[in-house]
Image (tube, rainbow, N blue to C red):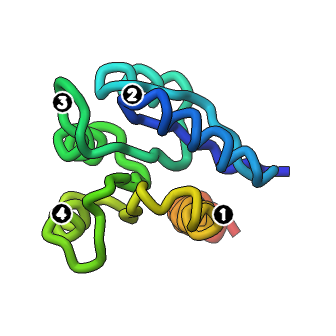
Amino acid sequence: MRYTTILVVDDSVTIRAMLEVLLERDPSLRIVGIASNGEEAFALIKETDPDVITLDIAMPGMNGMDVLDAIMKKEPRPVIMLSSLMREGSELRVQAAQRGAAGCFNKSRMVAQADELIEMIKDVAYQRGNRRDIPRLVRSVLRA
């Protein structure tokens, strides 16, 4: 079975623990790393090569938007931004999308809407997986 691997980045111990519990409900998901700041996140991205990253916006040091910018520049992959400020139509959602976020989720609704968060993670991982396979498919067609 192919797992969707996830890196959780959040400065809150409580949120990290909640995400672990919620995401482990789905056997197709595997948390491969947990970081409390941007520096830890970059080290874990290189070490674990996660399919998807969940990223808090408000963190000490580099904030989540700055971390998102750096991920998109250096290690592009799907990032789901988490914040209690991520309400429908908010300027923060628009900025996150413009900067490359694959999705935004209101973490104040994480428990009540856990299934929606899990589906979002699976969807963006699936899209990434299909993009990863394009060069391999092109090579196999060219060889045929």
**Gap in angstroms between the C-alphas marked 2 and 4:** 21 Å
- Answer with the quarter of the image where residue 71 lies: top left
**Gap in angstroms between the C-alphas marked 4 and 3:** 16 Å
Q: Is residue 137 placed above or below 58 in the rendered structure?
A: below
* Quadrant of the frame with the C terminus: bottom right
Which residue lies under the disc numbered 2? Answer: 41
- Which label number is shown at residue 105? none
Residues at discs 4 and 1 in contact (Cβ within 8 Å): no
Which residue lies under the disc numbered 4? Answer: 92
- Answer with the quarter of the image where residue 113 lies: bottom right
**For marks 1 and 3 on the same chain, the one whose residue lies earlier in the sequence:** 3
In the structure shown, which secondary structural element does the residue marked by tag 4 occupy?
A: helix
**For marks 2 and 4 on the same chain, the one whose residue lies earlier in the sequence:** 2
Q: Is residue 110 placed above or below 137 in the rendered structure?
A: above
Which residue lies under the disc numbered 1? Answer: 140
Pair 1/3: label in front: 3
Residues at discs 1 and 2 in contact (Cβ within 8 Å): no
Pair 2/4: label in front: 4
In the structure shown, which secondary structural element does the residue marked by tag 2 occupy?
A: helix
- Which label number is shown at residue 62? 3
In the structure shown, which secondary structural element does the residue marked by tag 1 occupy?
A: helix
Q: Can residue 104 be seen in the rendering of this structure? A: yes
In front of the other: 108 or 51: 108
Give the residue displayed 22% in from the left and 79% down from the top: 89
Q: As shown in the figure, which amino acid type bears the numbered disc 1?
A: Ser
In the structure shown, which secondary structural element does the residue marked by tag 3 occupy?
A: loop
**Gap in angstroms between the C-alphas marked 1 and 3:** 42 Å
